[in-house]
Image: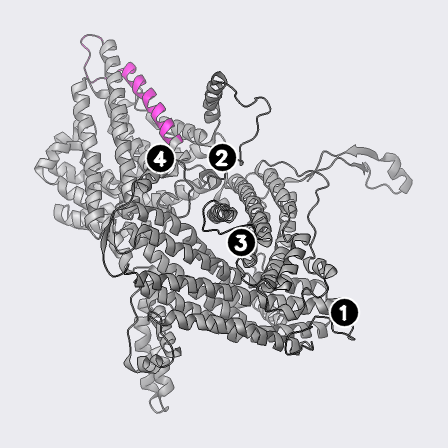
């Protein structure tokens, strides 16, 4: 077993680009010392390819990335090359560059399911834009016809036509950008609609007749649809990537990530076996001595080892996959595909994979739990002997957990490999004959038929070893225990122990039970996944490939998801740079933000219902989405007004201000900090694209074939940044589009001639002149967008951060309420089966999972806004960054511990043992309330105060520490005797006890943070002295006055 596992781990490390076994070390270790020079030379030779491989891996240039870079660069290259045909050039004339731009914005790199939905929305938006813009041109031409005096040039300036087209542009820009802010899935369709509307309305100011307008609109529509067609062809036929492939790759990464997380957790616990925080603290202070690092002294040393620091951020990446996979599964279920697994089987796989996250993620909390205990011990200021004794207890506890943790984590990792091999989500490792013969006689390897039984035997062995572990622990702490676990307890007869020692022993026991319980439950969850994989294989699901067509119900859901409001999760990475708002893109529930109207009763008849519908109109104009639409409209018209005035219309067309106008709706964002950061990066990206245009054109002396090849190379490289830095997608797109504009226009001039190129009023320039023109116009558009982002008032990241934190705390209150009901129903055993629709457990689990996923998505947005807040313009006092970061940390921890309470309480429902102790224990738990609605009430109050920047009410009662253990023992002294440690509910209660205490601590911290930020109402009276320098004590009271304070900040 060990040989096979080592081989698998070596292959996985090689595939992931991680640490490899160094050939030089192996060689030097086997040498006899006589050929050291040769050994060093060989070592140096071996290091070179390793360094190159590490650099290549660090850049992320794997096969899938290179394929996507190639796919993304092909559509605009094909469009530019196609335009070199005389027939194509005669069809599009001066609009050929729009084909390449539409092909680029078609985003053929998206998985098939997501691409089809986006392309459908793109086509619908362009067709609607064509219809509306054609109507606006008809109105403009009618206005021109009725107001043009006799003898005037038919294409000259006409104020009436310009005014009509300007009004249409204002209305369209406002409506589509309001939709863009309210529905994130319309980001790219709105950008394309804006380009279409801007091009048609600005050129339409010179159209004399409808025949000219219809011809132009036909060419413009065909140009966009041709670009979409090229992108569609590349997406579907060139290295086609289905959503199923993406999901399977993510599932493999998810399971491998969980396996790696278990190894990191084991390494952290092992690092504590001989760790001395005092020595580490002195070393750390010595290293930092003389360095001017802000906040270095505030960093707690305590029990944070280097392994712990590596472990701390690893869970966030897995949570990112956890929130992304469900959305990708939705797209995978909607697409037509050829494969082996049906959509329901993919959902079944994910349901079981999802169940593994909570126990393994809960093991990550050992860092926080140990840290809290270390801080509590340091706060008591114990003497040196007590500190040494507690440290020795910690070392002994970690050593006792080392072997079972290593065995179980290794077995779970093998179970994950078995699932991946069975479902064919990873390639089987290369077999070595010697290793196979050695391991075949011991036990089944992952991927073999007998693996499930062998894995189940390991889980059973791990569970049975808990009794022996309890014996060893009791022996270490001088607790006499009979062989049959009869009457052992923490206080022995005739031995008077201090309450502190008793609680210390109990904490150690509960911590050990916490780790063992979550490990055991993680093993059971992995076993369910293994059994499901074997069941699907035995059923013949994986033997044949078939055509998979989505059902009508799935397609109906798809339509609703495409046009309705759906939750924004981190999976929508290609539109993440457009908007930084988190809570506004999440459906937080009907109760959030919906208040009872104190001025209106609910409607009772049809007249009142019509009135309520009319009231929706001003409510819509007051919305944040409408405010963003107004900003984009005024920013667009700040540039467009130049085109609609007589004195500047020719200047607008001649100097290509059209693209400054187009950059406005593309680049505008809601918040000032993100806009400042993006503004700088987009200008840098445009400048780089200008330099690239020079290189592309002049390195081959303007030869068409060479220019197209180098343009493809530039686009190929540009898509690397688009793929690896999805938050900067607009920067990458603007850089690519700028190069397409410059190079594509020059190729257009070569193809159709100067006369036709200048027929639209734009003079033809050489490349060295045109490229700076493009840079200037793009920078001008970006500057206008930035100005209107911060004018008339900026929407700062700090404001968004505060509101999103209020929404997160609201969701936390919702989650805690659901968990409270879940725990209560499980203790009373009235919950039912969560897999059966209609039961209490089913509805509670659906609600819990929905709120949990939303909170994870919102926490990602909170971290992004916190990072972007550093770039916003500061006026006035300093932003309390530490308080907000502390609040975010509290929300993360309360979320994790609340999920663990819900998970551990499942033991009360699923446990098959109904011993006398179990029945008594349930009754006692009902009497002490393991969870409380006081937290729900307090969290709701904190959410409302923070979201609306209102002070907290006076005399706010914060729930105190609930001593569940003492409450139980007051009722029944022996209920928590060590003799009952084998009971399933005992370990579950230990987990709940630890998590409840941590939640209590964090809620107290959250209250303190919120009180610092928003203040507290204070109706009390205070004596305020008017003379602080009074030397006479009696004069102080005589000069003082009573003052009533409204708020205390």
Disc 1 is placed on an element classified as loop
* Res 246 visible: yes
Disc 2 is placed on an element classified as loop
Task: Specify which label sits upstream in the sequence, 1 or 4.
Answer: 1
Mark 1: few/some/many CA within 10 Å (<14, 14-19, 20+)? few
Residue closer to the observer: 666 or 271 = 271
Residue 466 location (% of width, % of height): 56, 72
Mark 2: few/some/many CA within 10 Å (<14, 14-19, 20+)? some
Q: Which residues make up the magenta segment? A: 149-178
The answer to whether 311 appears left or right of 105 in the picture is right
Task: Specify which label sits upstream in the sequence, 2 or 3.
Answer: 2
The answer to whether 42 appears left or right of 326 in the picture is left
Disc marking residue 794: 2
The answer to whether 141 appears left or right of 701 in the picture is right
Task: Specify which label sits upstream in the sequence, 2 or 4.
Answer: 4
* Of labels 2 and 1, the one closer to you: 1
* Of labels 2 and 4, the one closer to you: 4
The answer to whether 917 appears left or right of 971 in the picture is left
Residue at image x 68%, y 53%? 927
Task: Quote the CA–CA distance across marks 2 and 4.
Answer: 30 Å
Disc marking residue 498: 1
Residue 261 location (% of width, % of height): 46, 64
Residue at image x 9%, y 40%? 85
Quadrant hosting residue 1031? top right
Q: Say above or below: 115 vs 283.
A: above
Q: On the image, numbered disc 3 is attached to which residue?
A: 899
Q: Indicate the quadrant containing the C terminus: top left, top right, bottom left or bottom right.
A: top right
Residue 332 location (% of width, % of height): 31, 49
* Res 862 visible: no
> Dots 2 and 4: beta carbons under 8 Å?
no
Q: On the image, numbered disc 4 is attached to which residue?
A: 563
């Amino acid at each position: 077993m060990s040989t096979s596992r080592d081989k698998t781990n070596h292959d996985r490390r090689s595939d992931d680009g991680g640490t490899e076994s160094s050939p030089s070390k192996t060689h030097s270790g086997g040498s006899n010392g006589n050929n050291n020079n040769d050994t060093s030379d060989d070592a140096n030779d071996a290091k070179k390819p390793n360094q190159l491989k590490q650099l290549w891996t660090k850049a992320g240039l794997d096969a899938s990335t290179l394929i996507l870079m190639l796919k993304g660069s092909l559509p605009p290259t094909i469009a530019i090359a196609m335009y070199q045909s005389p027939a194509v050039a005669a069809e599009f004339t001066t609009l050929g560059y729009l084909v390449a731009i539409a092909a680029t914005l078609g985003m053929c790199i998206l998985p098939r399911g997501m691409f089809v939905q986006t392309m459908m929305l793109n086509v619908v938006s362009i067709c609607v834009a064509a219809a509306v813009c054609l109507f606006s041109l008809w109105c403009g031409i009618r206005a021109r016809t009725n107001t043009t005096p006799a003898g005037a040039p038919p294409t000259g300036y006409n104020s009436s036509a310009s005014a009509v087209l300007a009004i249409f542009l204002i209305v369209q820009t406002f409506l589509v950008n309001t939709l863009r802010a309210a529905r994130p899935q319309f980001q790219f369709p709105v950008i394309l609609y804006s380009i279409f509307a801007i091009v048609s309305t600005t050129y339409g100011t010179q159209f004399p007749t409808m025949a000219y307008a219809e011809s132009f609109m036909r060419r413009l529509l065909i140009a966009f649809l041709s670009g979409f067609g090229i992108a569609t062809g590349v997406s579907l036929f060139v290295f086609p990537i289905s959503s199923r492939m993406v999901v399977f790759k993510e599932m493999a990464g998810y399971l491998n990530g969980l396996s790696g997380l278990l190894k990191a957790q084991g390494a952290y616990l092992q690092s504590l076996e001989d760790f001395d925080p005092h020595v580490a603290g002195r070393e750390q202070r010595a290293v930092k001595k003389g360095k001017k690092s802000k906040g270095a002294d505030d960093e707690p040393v305590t029990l944070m080892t280097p392994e712990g620091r590596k472990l701390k951020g690893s869970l966030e990446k897995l949570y990112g996959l956890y929130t992304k996979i469900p959305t990708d599964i939705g797209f995978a279920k909607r697409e037509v595909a050829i494969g082996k697994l049906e959509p329901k089987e993919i959902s079944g796989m994910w349901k079981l994979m999802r169940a593994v996250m909570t126990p393994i993620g809960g093991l990550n909390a050992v860092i926080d739990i140990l840290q809290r205990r270390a801080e509590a011990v340091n706060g008591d200021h114990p003497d040196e002997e007590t500190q040494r004794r507690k440290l020795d207890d910690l070392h002994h506890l970690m050593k006792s957990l080392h072997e079972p943790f290593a065995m179980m984590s290794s077995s779970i990792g093998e179970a994950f490999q078995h699932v991946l091999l069975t479902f064919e989500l990873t390639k089987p490792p290369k077999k070595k004959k010697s290793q196979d013969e050695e391991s075949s006689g011991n036990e089944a390897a992952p991927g073999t038929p007998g693996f499930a039984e062998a894995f189940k035997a390991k889980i059973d062995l791990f569970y049975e070893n808990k009794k022996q572990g309890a014996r060893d622990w009791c022996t270490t702490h001088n607790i006499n225990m009979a062989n049959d676990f009869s009457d052992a307890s923490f206080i022995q007869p005739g031995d008077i122990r201090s309450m502190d020692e008793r609680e210390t022993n109990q904490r150690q026991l509960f911590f050990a039970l916490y780790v063992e319980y979550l490990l055991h439950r993680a093993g059971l969850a992995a076993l369910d996944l293994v059994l499901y994989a074997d069941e699907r294989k035995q059923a013949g699901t994986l033997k044949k490939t078939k055509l998979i067509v989505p059902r009508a119900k799935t397609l109906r859901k798809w339509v609703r998801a495409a046009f309705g409001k759906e939750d924004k999760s981190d999976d929508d990475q290609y539109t993440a740079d457009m908007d930084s708002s988190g809570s506004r893109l999440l459906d937080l529930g009907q109760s959030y933000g919906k208040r009872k109207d104190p001025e209106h009763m609910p409607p009772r008849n049809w007249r009142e219902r019509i009135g309520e519908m009319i009231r929706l109109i001003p409510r819509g104009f007051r919305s944040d989405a409408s405010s963003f639409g107004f900003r984009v409209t005024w920013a667009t018209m700040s540039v467009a007004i130049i085109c609609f005035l007589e004195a500047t219309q020719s200047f607008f067309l001649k100097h290509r201000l059209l693209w400054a106008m187009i950059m406005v709706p593309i680049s505008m964002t809601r918040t000032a900090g993100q806009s400042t950061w993006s503004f700088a990066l987009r200008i840098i990206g445009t400048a780089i694209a200008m330099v690239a245009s020079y290189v592309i054109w002049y390195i081959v002396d303007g030869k068409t074939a060479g220019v197209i090849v180098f343009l493809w190379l530039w686009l190929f490289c540009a898509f690397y940044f688009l793929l690896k830095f999805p938050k900067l997608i607009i920067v990458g797109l603007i850089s690519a589009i700028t190069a397409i504009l410059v190079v594509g226009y020059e190729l257009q001039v070569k193809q159709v001639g100067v006369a036709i190129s200048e027929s639209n009023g734009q003079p033809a320039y050489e490349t060295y002149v045109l490229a700076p023109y493009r840079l200037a116009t793009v920078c001008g558009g970006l500057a206008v967008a930035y100005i209107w982002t911060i004018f008339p008032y900026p929407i700062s990241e700090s404001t968004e951060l505060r509101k999103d934190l209020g929404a997160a705390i609201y969701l936390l209150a919702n989650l805690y309420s659901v968990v409270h009901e879940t725990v209560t129903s499980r203790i009373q055993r009235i919950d039912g089966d969560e897999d059966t629709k209609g039961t209490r457990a089913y509805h509670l689990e659906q609600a819990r999972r929905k709120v949990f996923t939303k909170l994870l998505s919102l926490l990602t947005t909170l971290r992004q806004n916190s990072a972007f807040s550093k770039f916003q313009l500061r006026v006035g006092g300093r932003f309390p960054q530490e308080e907000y970061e502390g609040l975010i940390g509290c929300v993360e921890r309360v979320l994790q511990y609340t999920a663990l309470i819900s998970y551990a309480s499942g033991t009360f429902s699923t446990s098959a043992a109904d011993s006398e102790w179990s029945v008594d224990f349930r009754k006692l738990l009902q009497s002490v309330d393991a969870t409380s609605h006081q937290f729900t009430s307090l969290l709701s109050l904190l959410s409302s105060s923070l979201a609306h920047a209102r002070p907290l009410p006076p005399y706010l009662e914060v729930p105190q520490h609930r001593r569940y253990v003492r409450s139980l023992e007051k009722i029944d002294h022996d209920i928590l005797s060590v003799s009952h440690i084998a009971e399933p509910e005992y370990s579950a209660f230990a987990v709940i006890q630890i998590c409840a205490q941590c939640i209590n601590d964090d809620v107290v911290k959250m209250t303190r943070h919120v009180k610092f930020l928003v203040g507290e109402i204070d109706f009390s009276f205070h004596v305020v002295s008017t003379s602080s320098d009074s030397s006479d004590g009696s004069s102080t009271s005589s000069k003082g006055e009573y003052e009533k304070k409204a708020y205390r900040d």
